[in-house]
Image (tube, rainbow, N blue to C red):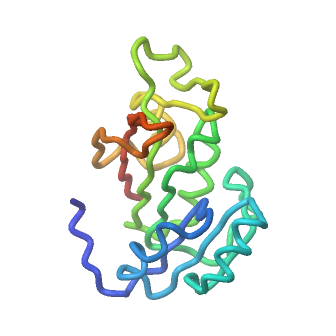
Amino acid sequence: ELGLPQENARSVLDAGCGTGLCANHLRPYAKTLAGADISAKMLNICLEKGVYDTLTRTDLSVPATYPEGSFDLVVAADVLVYFGNLEEVFRCIHAKLTPGGWFIFTVEKAPDPEPPAGYRLNASGRHVHTLDHINSALATSGFGIAKRHFEDTIRKELGQSVDGLSVAAQK
C-alpha cells in the first residue's frame, strides 16, 4: 500500500521481533535486517533460525537499549499491545529513523465505548488503543499524524478474530 519497492536497499529494524515471524516478509526490503526484542529466549530462537543480520536485546521504551545506527524502516508487528501510553516508544523509534523513514506497526483496536485515556489494559494482559491516542502520540513524538491506517483482523485468539489497526507513519 505504501509503494515501497522491494529492492534490498533499506536498513530495517524488526522492533519486538519475537521468534522472527516477520523476518522473511521484511527481508526483500532490507539491505540489513536487525531484530530487537526484550526476551533473551526469543532472541535465541531467532539466532538459531539465522534470519537477522544483527540481534539486540531491547526495551522499546528505553533509548539506550536500541541497536546502534539508524533505520529506514522500523516495523513493530503485534508488540505495541504490551505498552499503554505509546508516546515514549514512538519517541525512541522516531530518534532511530532516518529522515523520510517509515514506521509501520499494529495495535489491537479499542472497542466501543473507547477508553477515555485512549488505551486500556485488557484481561489478556495486552492493551487496546484508539486511533486518536495513536495520532496524538505520533504527533507528540515528532511524526505528525499517521500517513495511512486501516482496520483488520491482526490475529486469531481462541478461535476469535482480534480487531486491530495497521498504521504507517513517516519521519
Please name whichever residue, 96 or 155, is drawn nearer the observer in this view of the structure: 155
Front-most of residues 29 and 92 = 29
Residue 151 placed where, x, y %?
Answer: 30, 38
- The number of discs equals 0
State the image coordinates of residue 41 (x, y, percent, origin top left): 76, 66
Check the image and report above or below for 87 versus 109.
below
Q: Is residue 101 left or right of residue 58?
A: left
What is the quadrant of residue 62 in the picture? bottom right
- Looking at the image, which residue is at 43% across and 68% down? 99
> At 21% from the left edge and 68% from the top edge, which residue is drawn?
3
Quarter of the picture containing the C terminus is: bottom left
Q: Position of residue 46 (x, y in %)?
A: 64, 76
Q: Is residue 9 above or below residue 40?
A: below
Rendered residue at 42%/74% (across/down): 26
Q: Is residue 10 left or right of residue 59?
A: left
Residue depicted at x 52% and y 39%: 140
Position in image of residue 143 (x %, y %): 44, 49
The reply, left or right, for residue 62 in relation to residue 158 is right
| Picture quadrant where residue 81 is located | top right
Is 70 placed left or right of 24 in the picture?
right
Task: Specify the quadrant that holds the N terminus.
Answer: bottom left
